[in-house]
Image (spheres, rainbow, N blue to C red):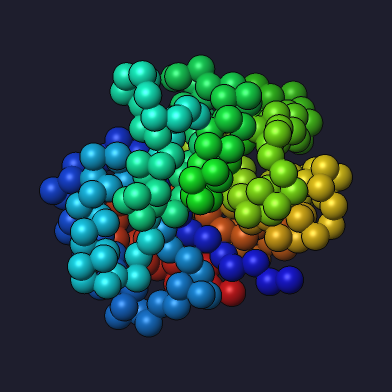
């Protein structure tokens, strides 16, 4: 079964709600000019929470092709959780995707696999597709323990999700040593781990779920390396940080990712 490639641009804590408008307009204009087809490669932006309303109004009002998501979500129902954002609130804003367990949240906010699984579950319950992030740091890679490390993160981060929920989720392999460093994993490195992730999903939930789940690579993806990454059989797309802040570059990446 063919999996639609997904190219997701993680804005991180860049771009306020005013600047978001022109970034989304420029990206959409570039995609229209390039005759981009969202069925051939889905293009999604992941702005900060405060930008989402502006992005929603723009996308709905002007019928833009760009889709959007969020960078985090609460694991909890609405209630006494100061500072958190419930999945239902995001769904009402038309959010389709949310990253959970990005390495910056695992590192700076001490999120563990159980928290990541709970957030993924909350997103799915609200009809939002979680992009579940996993990846090893440099020390683990140097010890050659990266596959077992990532597979353990997959086990923990998918814990409690049903087979159908896993099939409808996205898993992003982002080696921490390649994020924002310019140090891209080789296509073979990406394939090795993305394949191990899919095999683990097959072991947990069977062939059909393994065929359906989308596995992304992230870490210094650019237009100069995305084509080779996308040629790998188990790489279904990219989670792009720095390069997505340039709309022309991000549109180029999207064009090169078409199936
Ligand atoms: P990068 O970030 O493309 O800037 O390496 C990727 C990410 O953190 O999602």
Which residue is painted at 53% across and 33% down in the image? 119
Please determine whether, in this image, residue 27 is positioned above or below residue 94: below
Q: Quadrant of the N terminus?
A: bottom right
Q: Quadrant of the C terminus?
A: bottom right
Which residue is painted at 71% across and 32% down in the image? 159
Relative depth, front residue between 169 and 141: 169
Picture quadrant of residue 21: bottom left
- Left/right placement of residue 131 relative to residue 84 reads right
Picture quadrant of residue 90: top left
Q: Residue 210: percent from the left, percent from the top?
A: 77, 55
Q: Residue 73: percent from the left, percent from the top?
A: 43, 35
- Left/right placement of residue 26 relative to residue 240 reads left
Relative depth, front residue between 130 and 104: 130
- Left/right placement of residue 228 relative to residue 210 reads left
Q: Residue 91: percent from the left, percent from the top?
A: 40, 49
Residue 58 visible in rendering: yes
Relative depth, front residue between 178 and 117: 117
Which residue is painted at 53% across and 22% down in the image? 111
- Left/right placement of residue 214 relative to residue 146 reads left
Q: Residue 205: percent from the left, percent from the top?
A: 81, 47
Most extreme residue toward the left is 18
Number of labelled discs? 0
Residue 177 visible in rendering: no
């Amino acid at each position: 079964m063919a999996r639609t490639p997904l190219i997701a641009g993680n804005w991180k804590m860049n771009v306020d709600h005013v600047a978001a408008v022109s970034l989304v307009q420029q990206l959409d204009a570039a995609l229209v000019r390039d005759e981009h087809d969202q069925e051939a490669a889905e293009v999604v932006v992941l702005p900060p929470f405060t930008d989402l309303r502006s992005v929603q109004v723009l996308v709905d009002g002007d019928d833009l092709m760009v889709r959007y998501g969020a960078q985090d979500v609460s694991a909890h129902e609405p209630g006494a959780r100061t500072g958190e954002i419930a999945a239902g609130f995001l769904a009402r804003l038309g959010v389709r995707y949310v990253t959970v367990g990005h390495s910056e949240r695992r590192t700076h906010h001490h999120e563990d696999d159980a928290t990541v699984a709970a957030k993924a579950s909350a997103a799915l319950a609200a009809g939002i597709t979680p992009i579940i992030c996993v990846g090893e740091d440099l020390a683990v890679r140097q010890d050659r323990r990266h596959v077992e490390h990532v597979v353990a993160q997959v086990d923990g981060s998918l814990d409690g999700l049903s087979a159908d929920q896993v099939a409808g989720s996205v898993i992003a392999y982002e080696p921490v040593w390649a994020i924002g460093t310019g140090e891209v994993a080789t296509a073979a490195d990406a394939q090795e781990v993305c394949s191990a992730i899919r095999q683990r999903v097959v072991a947990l939930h069977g062939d059909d779920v393994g065929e359906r789940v989308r596995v992304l690579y992230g870490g210094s993806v650019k237009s100069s390396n995305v084509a080779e990454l996308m040629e790998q059989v188990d790489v279904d797309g990219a989670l792009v940080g720095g390069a997505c802040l340039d709309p022309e570059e991000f549109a180029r990446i999207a064009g090169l990712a078409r199936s």
